[in-house]
Amino acid sequence: MLLEDKVCVITGAASLRSIGYATAELFAEHGAKVVVVDLQMDGPVLAGIQSAIESKLRRPVSVHGFRCDISKAEDCDEMVRRVVELHGAIDCLVNSAGIVKSQSLLDISPQDLDLMFAVNLKGAFYLCQSVLKVFVERRSGNIVNVSSLAAQRGGGLVGGAHYAASKGGVLSLTRSIAREFGALGIRANAICPAMIETPMLDGLSPERLQDIVDAIPLKRTGTTRELAGACLFLASELSGFVTGATIDVNGGTHIH
Ligand SMILES: NC(=O)c1ccc[n+]([C@@H]2O[C@H](COP(=O)([O-])OP(=O)(O)OC[C@H]3O[C@@H](n4cnc5c(N)ncnc54)[C@H](O)[C@@H]3O)[C@@H](O)[C@H]2O)c1
């Protein structure tokens, strides 16, 4: 058990096929008190998540859920307030909520750009601010931000330039937090996934998907469980001396 009784808030977990859900499942397996957060969270969605985790683990687990629009600072503050009211603390935030859109740069309207930045970058920023207020008081805490390989290579697989830029901002934000709050024992790290089998890949044609897979050294897509494993490493004390890092989970795509 790597996260026994740790209160872990995981955003972007509404779909059972998402990285957020797989992370919630693996964290629950390791004893965490899991809080799943999403724009799409409601009673039936939460019940589905709880029953999926419990049938996988064959035991009751602590799972709570809150609806939150991460692009709204007041929603993030309110969600964090309610989690602290419920559990008395927060030990870890995994921010996996996000949106993607494939568009060429000159087709991106101001509205497209605003929405992408509002969710992926400002949403991550607001969430981090909200939990950091709790972490600073406790002088401990751990943030894992899910960025993207798009931030490193300049988009071009699934997301456009606005997606890549928003995820690049998440990497800079993560490093800034690691630097500013390290002295308080607070860690922040980022993960850059690519080609993980989730609803985000649904828009790709089979031919396009095959072309991309052919260029991956492991010659396959990744599973959400494999991405969750990287989150578990970063959320646990196994990575106690790791902060400000960017972990690639991409089948070797960026070997150089
Ligand atoms: N799947 C991949 O290959 C891949 C690759 C690179 C990066 N990522 C990143 O991984 C993260 C998880 O994506 P996924 O692949 O699990 O897809 P997903 O679509 O299943 O998960 C994203 C979740 O974010 C939620 N969300 C969207 N806007 C929100 C908002 N304003 N407030 C709260 N929640 C909101 C959605 O409802 C959805 O449940 C994303 O940040 C994505 O950019 C995924």
Image (cartoon, helix red, strand yellow):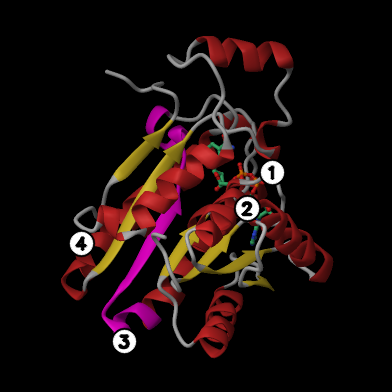
Q: Reading the chain from its start, which is encountered first: label 4 or label 2?
A: 2
Tell me whether circle 1 and circle 2 mark residues in contact (CB < 8 Å): yes
In this picture, residue 232 sits left or right of residue 20: left
Q: Is residue 148 magenta?
A: yes
Looking at the rendered image, the quarter that the N terminus falls into is bottom left
Q: Reading the chain from its start, which is encountered first: label 3 or label 4?
A: 3
Which residue lies at the image location 43% right of the left edge and 50% below the top edge? 231
> 197 or 112, which lies in front?
197
Which residue lies at the image location 37% right of the left edge and 75% below the top edge? 132
Q: Which residue is mark 1?
A: 17
Q: What SS does tag 4 mark?
A: helix
Q: What SS does tag 1 mark?
A: loop
Q: Does 138 sit above or below residue 161?
A: below
Mark 4 or 2: the one toward you? 2
Tell me whether circle 4 and circle 2 mark residues in contact (CB < 8 Å): no
Q: Residues within 10 Å of mark 3 (few under 14, many from 20)?
A: few
Q: What SS does tag 3 mark?
A: helix
Residue 21 circle label? 2
Mark 3 or 1: the one toward you? 1
Please state the horizontal and vertical placement of residue 29, each as a whole percent of the image.
Answer: 53, 57
User: For disc 2, does the CB lie below 8 Å from ligand 1?
Assistant: yes
